[in-house]
Image (cartoon, grey):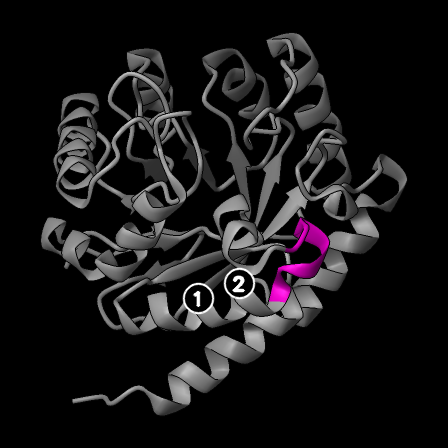
């Protein structure tokens, strides 16, 4: 496996499991309780770091099923406002698929880019490469999460790696894109991706597990986002057992405990 390094933190290839906390500045989020108002951002960021987060992922756009539209300018304003509050206190990833937002974010100290569109826009690749930033890239052919089956997602992640090579990005993590991203993607499609998560290790890149409180969990548990933490923790453990190198979560302290148990049980050669 080719490891990735984010602000000096090695990801994958036998490194400790890394924990990415969601710093959510989108009031439209499917998990409303995770929204952090501006005046609470610094405090919440410090809390997440104390609880065990290695990276904070700053996101301003809701992307769950049925999310309302948001202008690029509003996303940019939210992201830059958040970065002013947390700059310099943590390792920061910016969650955006828009070059205009990334350009504004690059004026601050950031350490990675989380692009759910998998560099569909070549300008994103150019900006990331020019800034020499590592990237976290989701499976996307023409739009985020548009591949359905395990085989389709594997092929799509292969296309994402080609985009990286074309852009000159060498440091990156792959995200299979588990979730109800498109109307065609079914709940059972997502469970199949989880069951076969280890298949994506064939691409020889660290894998991101990003399933925290998502809707397909709600479909199984028949619970709203506010009550899906335990289901998320159970699935995080199973994805770690299948080779995930980094976990993105709303529940930092609880997930940190899950990772500690996994690390203790992991057999090392």
Span shown in magenta:
223-229
**Total numbered labels:** 2
Q: Residue at x 64, y 62 (%)?
A: 251
Residue at image location 48% in from the left, 42% down from the top: 111
Residue bearing mark 1: 235
- Few, some or many residues within 10 Å of mark 1 (<14, 14–19, 20+): some
Residue 21 at what x, y percent from top left?
Answer: 59, 54
Q: Is residue 228 above or below residue 119?
A: below
Confirm whether residue 175 shows in the render. no
Residue 34 is left or right of residue 171, and the answer is: right
| Proximity of marks 1 and 2: CB atoms separated by less than 8 Å | yes
12 lies left or right of 34: left
Q: Mark number for residue 232?
A: 2
Q: Is residue 53 left or right of residue 262?
A: right
Residue 119 x/y as whole percent:
31, 23
Q: Residue at x 62, y 60 (%)?
A: 228
Q: Is residue 7 left or right of residue 45?
A: left
Q: Is residue 248 above or below residue 156?
A: below
């Amino acid at each position: 496996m080719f490891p990735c390094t984010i602000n000096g933190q090695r990801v994958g290839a036998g490194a400790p499991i890394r924990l990415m906390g969601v710093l959510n500045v989108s009031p439209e989020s499917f998990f409303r309780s995770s929204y952090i108002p501006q005046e609470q951002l610094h405090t919440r960021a410090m809390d997440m770091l104390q609880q065990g987060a290695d990276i904070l992922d700053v996101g301003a756009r809701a992307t769950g099923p049925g999310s309302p539209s948001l202008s690029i300018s509003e996303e940019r304003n939210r992201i830059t406002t958040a970065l002013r509050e947390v700059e310099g206190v943590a390792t920061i990833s910016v969650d955006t698929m828009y070059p205009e937002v990334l350009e504004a974010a690059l004026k601050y100290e950031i350490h990675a880019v989380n692009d759910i569109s998998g560099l569909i826009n070549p300008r994103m690749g150019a900006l990331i490469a020019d800034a020499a930033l590592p990237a976290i890239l989701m499976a996307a052919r023409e739009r985020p999460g548009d591949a359905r089956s395990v085989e389709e997602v594997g092929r799509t992640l292969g296309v994402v790696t080609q985009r990286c090579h074309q852009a000159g990005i060498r440091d990156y993590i792959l995200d299979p894109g588990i979730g109800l991203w498109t109307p065609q993607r079914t709940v059972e499609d997502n469970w199949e991706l989880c069951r076969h998560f280890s298949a994506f290790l064939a691409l020889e890149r660290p894998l991101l597990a990003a399933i925290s409180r998502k809707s397909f969990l709600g479909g199984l548990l028949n619970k709203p986002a506010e009550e899906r933490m335990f289901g998320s923790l159970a699935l995080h453990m199973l994805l770690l057992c299948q080779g995930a190198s980094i976990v993105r979560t709303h529940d930092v302290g609880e997930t940190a405990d899950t990772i500690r148990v996994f690390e203790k049980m992991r057999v090392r050669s």
